[in-house]
Image (cartoon, grey):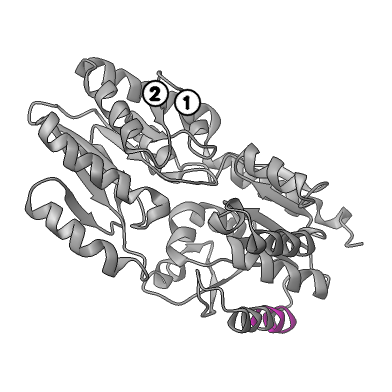
Amino acid sequence: MKILILTNYANGLWLFRKELLMAFMEDGHEVLVSVPPDENVDKLRSLQCKGRTAKIIETPFERRGNNPVRDFGLFLKYTGMLRRDKPDVVLTYTIKPNLYGGLACRMRRIPYLCNITGLGTAIENGGVLSKILLKFYRMSTRKAQRVFFQNTKNRDFMKRHGVAVDNSMMLPGSGVNLKEHPFRKYPSEREGINLLAVIRIMKDKGIEEYLEAAIIMKHRDSRLRFWLAGEYEQETKEQYEPVIRELEQCGAVRYLGHLDNVAEVMAQSHIIVHPSYHEGLSNVLLEAAACGRPVLASSINGCIETFREGKSGYSFEKESVDSLLDAIERIAQLPEAQRRHMGEKGRAWVEKHFDRNIVIEAYRNELAGLRNHEIR
């Protein structure tokens, strides 16, 4: 079977779905990946299983732009790709591949599976743009064999608006590779307590609340050290880079930049903080729990599923510095042994509910059922 994957970011596919690609190749399928070109594409080219490699189709497009002319160009690229490569099934991830790729598959009558990894602010904030996108989603997903969701709030919201009413299914996010992310011994706190945020540096990921909390806690509790890992979004770099540089100079924040191996830094951390405004299902929190670290996270769907309140982490209100500060002080007041124990409980939780193999088997089952699928 020839499987075409449409996505918007090579590194996301590498970090969270390379095992799925390997499973497809192990099963004897031919794998093609359409992705915008960047420095991460070579990682996907390096994947190999049973002498098979994935064919990369570099497909430039703006991940966050809203230019309808350029986006229509993406639809034409996908349509031409389907005509040229003749895949047996298409897998789509993230908003634009879901919308334009799904619609192209529907028009070409090619079986396809969509994965709605998150709704995004354009839909969640309501208004005219939200109505347009929801109508587009109804068209693009209607003939999908399956539309995967990563949290029940997103699924229920979309179903209320007529999206994926009869073909939806839940997945435990992207799952977590428990071998690649083994339990790590909790480090000593003799030299301080390291809090780590692994986020793209943009407002919707809670960067402003995290930085403000770091400034305030620097004067309240000298034990706490605030680390930050993640890359700048092109459109926000000019806004946040000078601020973060200044906070580094005064010792409020340690900025680690973009990391290919976040697990090594998580292993040196004591608490993982995730102040995001919206998530499909947070890979950062899954990896933090797999590592054996307690978490502080926004009280939103996509985060709260990954830990047990008071057992392996604490939640706080999104967009609220005061609520985040309360959560930080609450966990900082615990004995070191209790923080360590919370991390152990987090590991047990993801082992039971979020093994990445669950996701792989869901896709395998959908491919096996393709013979009985008819696009009406």
Secondary-structure class at tag 1: helix
Dividing the image into 4 quarters, which one contains the C terminus?
Answer: bottom right
Tell me the residue that label 2 is attached to.
312
Q: Is residue 132 above or below residue 312?
A: below
Q: Which residues are magenta?
A: 77-84
What percent of the width, then of the height, locates residue 309? Answer: 44, 22
Viewer-nearest residue: 339 or 330 = 330
Tell me the residue that label 1 is attached to.
349
Q: Is residue 173 visible?
A: yes
| Dot label at residue 305 | none
* Residue visible at 28% across and 59% down in the picture: 258
What percent of the width, then of the height, locates residue 264? Answer: 25, 45
Q: CA distance from mark 1 to mark 2?
A: 9 Å
* Residue visible at 72% across and 60% down in the picture: 137
- Kind of residue indicated by mark 1: Trp
What percent of the width, then of the height, locates residue 51? Answer: 52, 67
Secondary-structure class at tag 2: loop
The kind of secondary structure the magenta stretch mainly shows is helix
